[in-house]
Amino acid sequence: MEGNTIGYLVGGSLKENFQVRLTVPPTEIQEGAFVVIETEERLFYGLITDLHLGATDPRFADEQSEMRLPPLLAQALHGQTLFTTAEVLPALMLERGPDPASPAYQAWQQAHPTPAGPIPVKTVPPHHAPARLATAGDIAEIFGKPDDRHFIIGYTREQGHPVTIDLEKFVQRSAGIFGATGTGKSFLTRILLAGLIKYNQTSLLVLDMHSEYGYDDVASDTKERVTGLKTKFPARVLVVGLGRGTLIHEQPPDFHLELAYSDIHTSDIELLARELNLRETAPTVLQALEKSFGREWLLKFKEMNREEIEEEDENGKVRRVPHPGSVAAWADDTGVNRMAAESLHDKLRRIFNKAYLVERPASDSLGQIIQALTNGQHVILSFGRHDEDLDYLLVSNVLSRRIREEWEKRADEFRSGKSKVEPRPLVIVVEEAHKLLNRELAGQTSFARIAREMRKYYVTLLIIDQRPSQIYDEVMSQLGTRISGWLGDEDDIHAVLAGLAGRDALRGMLARLQPKEEVLLLGWGIPMPIPVRSRRYDAQFWKELLSERKRTTEEKLAELMP
Amino acid sequence: MGSAIEVGRLLRASSREFVAGCRVSQLNAPAFGALVSVPLRADEQLYGLIYDIQIADDGLVRQLVTSENVSDEVIRDNRERRIVPVEMSVLAVGYAQNGQIRYLLPPRPPLSLDAIYLCDPDEVRRFTSGNLGYFRHILRAHDTLPVGELLASHLHQAAGTQADPQAWLQRAVQEIITLLRDDYATLMEVLSALREVIA
């Protein structure tokens, strides 16, 4: 038997976990270890979720017999009466057929011409089936052999075997990276983004609220220099700064994003109700504005004044009336409550003066972003000094709406045969996702819709957050791949595990991850949950990533036909 | 069997145990816990462990005990020519047929006055080199016998005949624990006794 045998099966069921009696000291095994239970026909793959100490009689455990007995007797006694049982959460099994040397093997091979992959566990191994720690080969069998598509995300905790993530599956559905502050989320995100850029099958749009990902940065805790994605992929990554003249870490971006007033819809403002502290009357006023001015409503509203003029009536009496270009005059004309309109006008002043909003942008920077993404480039939108929640919500929403419209159009054209070009898959990376995807806003932003249904239009989200419990449940349940670092809050843990099998066992594992550099991989995109020591984002990482030579066709053929 | 030391002759027997009587002059050879054998036929012999040695009194001893100034001569005379034999109780632990040892109760017990021999080291090694299944005969009697003492004494004697005494002792201890692990009290009693012979 290959690998290290750690014990043998003594009990269990499909509904509950398998129990493995350990034959090695318990300290050699950790929670989360990837275990293989072997039978003649199948391999069962599982995860250790608990270890408990047992005794054939509690008195053997109670009495410190090693104090009374010589070592030989005490060891022999403990060896037989005290034991450790490991709970193994069964995840997958693999048919391996009879012994290749036996005559039955040929018949089996004919009945199974293509090797079946691992499938969910549907039976139990017999009593006393040996259990061992997984080898690098087992892990490659389940998670895939490291290559461009199967990207090494980390290593198993005990033996350091590489664990890969299937990037093709990863981008097929929205995904999430979670973890409390300081658990290395942003490093892990950089690693994943670097892998996705290298894989080159999808475009990325990173909404980089804190300007972390583009240019080199300094780590907030260690104060060490952190390489930016632009530094390593200068041609394929575009850094876009929000607003004219914005510098990102003292460097000019590739271009600036400016929005026209006409890009802002009234619904974008409704979304900001809480940020702007809007009154209940705001939606009515916004509706009237849109009706009066169409797409130009924001600019027109901005240009309105609050003045009054003196007017003499037919009786020669002078009275003060609203200026014809004032908010009040417009309100009176359209039958909107004057106070409500003026209140909204006051509150929108915060928007009117945003430097990135202009009447006529110097270039179609939104279009440029979309063009770059279509061409297979990756865009990191750095918010620079405009890093208030208000900016983040407004710009992200406008941008994602444009993207959604564009990709929907292209996908429909491709499907109907009007266009031969399949839209390039796009992943929108959303930092501080709870700001956009909380219960209150999820229904209104484009993001919830992207998470829910844009998979068929080639757009998915990668959301990064420290408070997954704040994210709308419906969005959380759509996440295919979840990568979570340590979480302390019970609600957050609950949110990350929502909709997954074996939640109870995984919950403890999540709470007991090491606060740094350990993450739990979960969800549809991961063959089975597994905790890993995450890859380090350092010079070595870049060396490995960039030196991995693309295999030639000959090499690939040689691999297929050994 | 010619060179083997005869330690007595059979007084009475059952399938599970038997009692031998011996002279005081024979008493130097057998020891508590020693392995003895009783040849039944040419190709069959029975094995047992001495678990008790009794020296009964008689009327003369009772008289002598109460009298004063008993001379050495009288004591010697009484010991060597006593009319009541020394009784050795032996627990049947197995038998050999055609050279094959089985840790089972013998097909039939020995007969009165069958000679009983002390096993020599080679024979002890042969008998104790199997799977140690004969321990169960000893442990079964734990209500009536000083099992811990008997095992300690037997292990001490038997280990000395093995090529690797330490390894054999380990194996023996494992077997004892396996058989007794559901009986905490007896196991701890036995281990306490074994502590005297196992460092």
Image: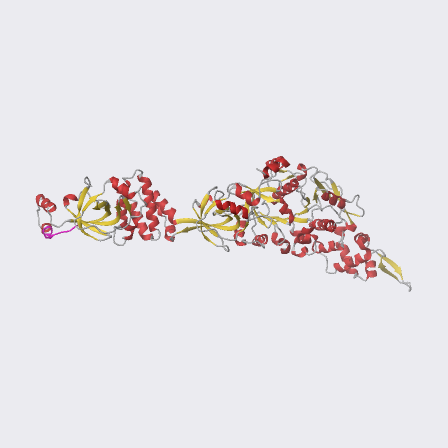
Q: How is the image coloured?
A: secondary structure
Q: Residue A234: where, in percent of width, then height?
A: 69, 37
- In the visual, does A163 lie left or right of B119? right
Pick whichever, A82 or B102, lies toward us.
B102
Count of number-bearing discs: 0
Using residue B10 as the reference point, say whether residue A135 is left or right of it: right
As rendered, which of A399 and B140 lies closer to the eye? Answer: B140
Q: Which residues are magenta?
A: B55-62
Residue situated furthest bottom in the rendering: A315
Provide residue A142's location: percent of width, then percent of height. 55, 45
Does residue A306 appear left or right of residue A183 in this picture? right
Does B57 lie within the magenta span?
Answer: yes
Q: Position of residue A343 (x, y in %)?
A: 76, 57
Residue A88 visible in the shown view: yes
> Seen in the image, is A301 located left or right of residue A541?
right
Q: Examine the structure image and report whether residue A243 is included in the region drawn in magenta.
A: no
Query: In the displayed structure, would residue A428 be above or below residue A344?
Result: above
- In depth, the one of A261 and A193 nearer the eye is A193
Query: At which x and y percent is residue A388?
Result: 69, 48
Q: Kindly tell me whether residue B39 is visible in this rendering.
A: no
Q: Which quadrant of the rendered structure holds the C terminus of chain A?
A: top right
Q: Quadrant of residue A544?
A: top right
